[in-house]
Amino acid sequence: MKPIRGALLTVALALTLISCSSTTDATPSTTSTPAPTATELITRSTTAMKAVRTAHFTLKVTGTLPDLLVQTGAGDLTSSGSAQGTATVRQFGQLVEVEFVVVDKELYLKAGTGGFSRVPAALAGQVYDPTAILDPDRGVANVLASTTGLSAVTSGDGTWTVGGTVPKAVAASLTPGISTDVAGTFVVDAQSSRTSSISFATTGSDGQPATVELSLSDFDKELAITAPTGS
């Protein structure tokens, strides 16, 4: 009986060792990928935004900025310089709802019940020129690449948030009316590296705080923007 008992003990010991080995192998690794730095995130997003062909945008201006008539806006745009949408514009102390179309560097506006009218292209810079948003030399990509003093990043809901200082000339190329360096905050998608939100914090022409918030979505969807008929 002793040889049999010894054999059983040997089998039991072997099974115990196999079980422990399997348990050890199944333990997940605790090694994690280090979080990207603010510089890495902004560099990646600059590259990603230069490649964007189309996007939907929303704009909100709080406070008063000189030379900027628009208060809110929303619409679609392309990197080739076309855009269409709606905006709320200050005119003679009143807020006026307008529709706009920009095609081939021509701006068309429609207010009230009338039709579209073609207006001088120079006026687009005062109303707000949405075609600058995806322009690599004037828009979001240029703002990202020019931002200095990048702060530590925070994460949440699949995004990273980065802060920094945007030079006034760069900020003004995207948002007319800015006359000083501004504090910029950027929300970058963790997966695509695209920037989905930009906000500028500055001082308005009345000495009070002013902010500009630009949000982007629906990247690279198909768009067909044409000049309004009869304009």
Image: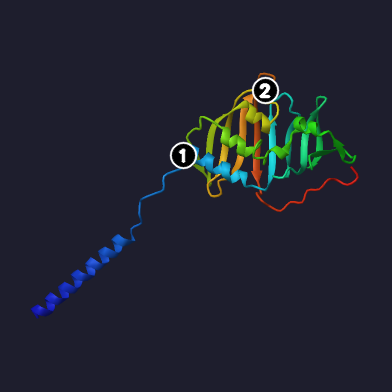
Q: What element carries label 2?
A: loop
Residue shown at the point (25%, 68%) measured from the top left: 18
Residue 6 or 150: which is nearer the viewer?
A: 150
Type of the residue with mark 2: Gly
- The residue most toward the top is 207
In the picture, measured across the screen, residue 114 lies left or right of residue 84, that is: right
Type of the residue with mark 1: Thr
How far is the residue under mark 2 from the one under mark 1? Answer: 32 Å
In the picture, measured across the screen, residue 43 lies left or right of residue 65, that is: left
Q: Earlier in the sequence, mark 2 or mark 1?
A: 1
In the picture, measured across the screen, residue 183 lies left or right of residue 228, that is: left
Percent x, y for residue 174? 67, 33
The residue pinned by badge 1 equals 37
Percent x, y for residue 113? 89, 40
Q: Residues within 10 Å of mark 1 (few under 14, many from 20)?
A: some
Residue 175 or 85: which is nearer the viewer?
A: 175
Number of marks in the image?
2
Image quarter hosting the N terminus: bottom left
The residue pinned by badge 2 equals 204
Mark 2 touches mark 1? (CB < 8 Å): no
Residue 96 or 69: which is nearer the viewer?
A: 69
Q: How crowded is mark 2: few (under 14 residues within 10 Å), some or many (20 or more)?
A: some
Residue shown at the point (36%, 56%) measured from the top left: 28
